[in-house]
Amino acid sequence: MRTTAVYKDKRFLDHNPGKTHPETPKRLEKIYQVLEQKDVSRHFLFPSFSPLSEDILLYNHSQTMIDEVALTAGKTAVYLSGDTRTSALSYETSLLAAGAVIDGVRRVCDGEADNAFCLVRPPGHHAEKHKSMGFCLFNNIALAAHYCLRRLGLKKILIVDWDLHHGNGTQKSFYNSAQVLFCSLHQYPQYPGTGSIEEIGQGDGKGYTINIPLKGGFGDAAYGKIFEEIVTPVAFQYQPDIILVSCGFDIYQGDPLGIMRVTSAGFAYMTRKLVNIAEQICNGKVLITLEGGYNMEAMHHGSLAVLQELYGSPIPGIAPYLTDETVIQSRLSDSNVDILPHLKNILGQYWTFQDSNV
Ligand SMILES: [Zn+2]
């Protein structure tokens, strides 16, 4: 059993982009209810944390952009982009979400927690230096990576982004850097349109952006295979000081915005893999933060599957989601992820892969 810090706060429900918007406060309500049950909550650490200060926001965002978001405070509705609408408390909530993720990396690096799960809103991975977009105000995970490098003395950060959508904001923040390895699995083509296999970084960052664009319909076995054949060998070669995860549950089967077919077992599997890798190379340091996910059942079961794997033991009252790892293992070979040979070919000059198959 590990010490897992869980970031949960009712104030994350205060950001309301509108009644018909998919990024609704309801996404967090059910999982919060489960976490409030004493027999569940007693297994986790629930740290207190503060809203992020502007000096740290400037690590990843321009002053103009920060001012633009700040000006939405107190207003009923402002559109920062076509799909990104704020409410009166959105600015405050977004500072709190980023503050939670920063507090999480600090505690994990200080050893107060082994790992952390940030159940926050609004999400962040689409937010770029100069603009909020894609339901995201500030880029929580990019801010956390900057904070690790500038304030916590870490040298290398691995970000794995398994949200349905490409994390364009995070990619742009570190496109020229070898200090952050950004690895994204996403449906393609899809919003926001970036994330092609050829986008591999620039300058010093060449080879440190890995995009795995997938046509729809892939499930647990395909994601497992990609983790086996791409994510795991790259992580061992890169040797990061911490693993950060942009966790979207919109790859869950039945999500209204996507057509992937991952189940709770798949989320448990991906989490277990990353925790195991982290235990071997960076003292188990993993922080997972919530991005998308618009099917309420998926949010609930997916979150519990991730939590259980971070904790490392079944939680009484919650059935284990990954009871027999061999089920996924046995299906790996059957899963045809047709872009893998091409991907290995493109990345072959930067990374070594076991089964080149090219
Ligand atoms: Zn998404």
Image: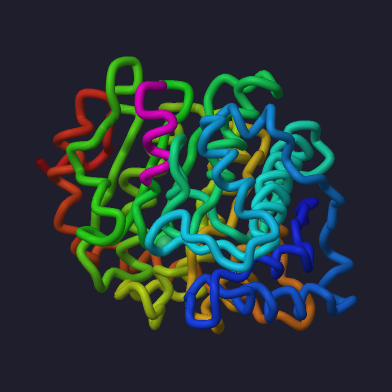
In which of the image's four quarters is ligand 1 placed? bottom left
Q: Is residue 170 magenta?
A: yes
Residue 286, given in percent of the width and then of the height, sits at 63, 44
Q: Is residue 338 left or right of residue 127?
A: left
- Work out whether residue 270 can be spotted: no
Residue 309, given in percent of the width and then of the height, sits at 63, 61
Quadrant of the image occupied by residue 342 = top left
In this rendering, is residue 131 above or below 282? below
Quadrant of the image occupied by residue 257 = bottom left
The residue furthest top is 204
In this rendering, is residue 176 above or below 247? above
In this rendering, is residue 313 above or below 226? below
Residue 233, given in percent of the width and then of the height, sits at 38, 37
Which is more toward the observer, 176 or 94?
Answer: 94
Range of residues picked out in magenta: 168-177
Give the image's coloring scheme.
rainbow
Q: Is residue 88 left or right of residue 199?
A: right
Q: Is residue 338 magenta?
A: no
Q: At x 78% / y 39%, what residue is drawn?
A: 107
- Work out whether residue 74 can be spotted: yes
Q: At x 67% / y 63%, what residue is drawn?
A: 88
Q: At x 41% / y 22%, what residue is drawn?
A: 177
Q: At x 82% / y 61%, what residue is drawn?
A: 44
Q: Is residue 214 left or right of residue 182?
A: left
Residue 167, given in percent of the width and then of the height, sits at 39, 48
Quadrant of the drawing holding the N terminus:
bottom right
Magenta stretch prevailing secondary structure: helix
Which is more toward the observer, 126 or 30?
Answer: 126
